[in-house]
Image (tube, rainbow, N blue to C red):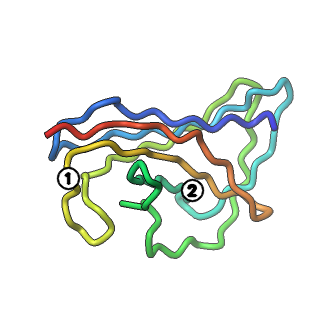
Amino acid sequence: NAMLLELAVPAEVPAGHPVPIVLRLTNAGNAARDLALQGRPTAYDVIVTQRDGAIVWRRLDGEVIQSILRLQTLAPGESLEFRHSWDQRNNSGDRVPPGEYVVTGVLPTDPPAELRTQAVPFRILP
């Protein structure tokens, strides 16, 4: 697959500060690629877990993704970026404690499939 989905997050973030998360989809191949993206605006998920894999927060938790498909053509080397700022709260709205976390980005595509980033560790400082 010539589509490369990468995630960037700071290695350390002070407690209480927003965590900037960037999801970047790049056509790493040498031909243009068509991608059917879901939702408008495009639905993408960011999942924060504890190191044991327990989910702390999901961007799309409880969201209904509109069944709108948008065809996006990416030229070779072209990228799409999605930016989100996580407020260090879990899906119940409670602030999470300082410690080690792991974040993963997911981009649902059609036919039902998904592109997933590598899991990236980061730390919330006390």
Secondary structure found at label 2: loop
Hey, what amino acid is under mark 1? Answer: Pro
Q: Foreground mark, 2 or 1? A: 1
**Residue 79, image x and y in percent?**
62, 32
- Residue 42 is labelled as 2
C-alpha span from label 2 to label 1: 30 Å
**Residue 31, image x and y in percent?**
86, 29
What is the quadrant of the N terminus in the image?
Answer: top right
Q: Which residue is denoted by mark 1 in the rendering?
A: 97
Q: Nearer the viewer, residue 76 or 104?
A: 104
Q: Is residue 2 left or right of residue 56?
A: right
Q: Residue at x 40, y 40 (%)?
A: 21
Q: Nearer the viewer, residue 11 or 114?
A: 11
- Eyeballing the image, is 90 above or below 125? below
Badge 2 crowding class, 10 Å Cα cut-off, few under 14, some 14 to 19, many 20 or more, is some
Q: Residue at x 30, y 37 (%)?
A: 123
Dividing the picture into quadrants, the one containing residue 77 is: top right
Q: Residue at x 70, y 63 (%)?
A: 69
Q: Is residue 98 left or right of residue 81?
A: left
Q: Earlier in the sequence, mark 2 or mark 1?
A: 2
Dividing the picture into quadrants, the one containing residue 36 is: bottom right
Q: Nearer the viewer, residue 59 or 80?
A: 59
Q: Residue at x 71, y 47 (%)?
A: 72
- Eyeballing the image, is 66 above or below 83? below
